Image (cartoon, rainbow, N blue to C red):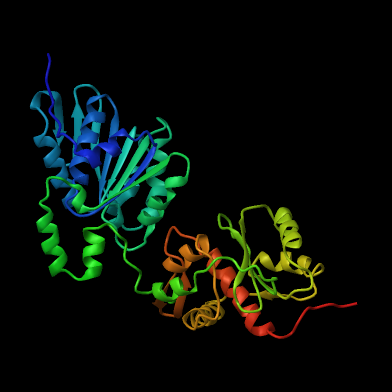
Amino acid sequence: MRVEVTLKKPHKAQQAVLDSTARFRVMMCGRRFGKSLISQDISIDHGINKEFVAYITPTYQLGKIFFQEVIKSLPTEIYRKNEADLVINFITGGSIRFFTGERLDAMRGLKFHLVIIDEASYIPNLQEGWNNSIRPTLTDFKGKAIFLSTPKGRNFFYSLYMKTDEPDWESFKFTTYDNPHIDPTEIDAAKAQLPHSVFEQEYMANPMENAANPFGSEHINKCTKELSKQPTEYYGIDLAKSVDWTVIIGMDRQGNTTEVHRFQKDWLQTKETIITVCHKNKPIVIDSTGVGDAIVEDLQKHFNSMHGFKYTSTSKQQLMESLASSIHKAEISFPSGAVKDELEIFEYVFTSTGVKYSAPQGFHDDCVNALALANKCRIEHKGYGTYIYS
């Protein structure tokens, strides 16, 4: 029996995603770009070719809609469906199973050749779901994953989009204008009617600045400069916790960043790097929280003015408010790259115990912490000069 299945013809921008050989692909798209249509065709293609496909949507209701749309594209002779469980089984042996982002633990114990995560920005706890439920299902077949969504601020989906330079990852960004089947005058009309931030995010696929950012993009941009060539007078050091980074930031007497060192090493190598990088007679403020306390005690033998700083909810709030004040007053500067990127996504939230300052889920804040510690060192040791003890 020969049965033909006709899939939708991709437009040029969609074809770029189809041509990618990356194991993990991330599509950040404006509304009506056609991301869901192309992902449904990809799932059909893999299912017919004897592969197991998982299709994840934020809600069960959206999963039902996509399930019905896939069914409409298929000749009845080539599949059996289970509407209760949202499963399509092909006569070739492949399948498409729909899951809800609200219950990703239902994927445990299963294995897939391909996982598609649709509207990924709107799936709650996506980072935990990816690490604990989704990623393990790809192990048996060395499977692939496609993340696609309109952005929703700079959340975990955005952090995946930023992985494009890492091995196995490739990211794509498309606006609604990139869909040739949408009349551009309709998009222009939406631009005229919608608030700027809404249009930029929903149509231009530009994640909008987090309103909870304590620094503000305008102030961050004003303070972004190339590294100073003046001597380093103050240091701030944030020590790595588990998968984080150790960051050393130096500042000159005027508050301009002179050096940035960001690395992941074991404790012995970390201590050796700090001893090599930092001048022994310059003041240093270093994270001494938890296991950092022991390493700081050891390091203090090598430096004349090293001061430990323990993070608590109160002390970090004060530290970050001081950094925000210095940035707003343009008293300091820092380079583009990791430091600026972390400053732009940093945020605060109000909790029952006060204000919590940190990077959003899936991001790092080590550079922000090191910059804040360097700034604290600058403020507290300004005018004290070089420390030399006999």
Residue depicted at 86% across the width and 78% down the height: 389
* Residue beneath the point at 14% across and 61% down: 188
Q: Is residue 85 visible?
A: no
Quick one: which residue is furthest to the right in this view? 390
Place of residue 380 in the rendered image (x, y in percent of width and height, measured from the top left): 66, 84
Does 144 sit above or below residue 172?
A: above
Spot occupied by residue 79 in the image (x, y as percentages of width and height):
15, 27
Q: Nearer the viewer, residue 260 or 252?
A: 252
- Of residue 35 and residue 249, the one placed in the foreground of this image is 249
- In the drawing, does residue 306 fall left or right of residue 90? right
Give the position of the C terminus as an image quadrant: bottom right
Residue positioned most to the front: 229
Q: Is residue 38 above or below residue 336?
A: above
Image location (x, y in percent) of residue 358: 47, 69
Q: Quadrant of residue 308?
A: bottom right
Measured as percent of width and height from the top left, residue 120 is found at 30, 52
Q: Is residue 106 left or right of residue 364?
A: left
The residue sitting at 35% across, 68% down in the picture is 209
* Quadrant position of residue 251: bottom right
- The one nearer the camera, 204 or 105, is 204
Image quadrant holding the N terminus, namely: top left
Q: Is residue 377 above or below residue 40?
A: below
Q: Is residue 89 visible?
A: yes
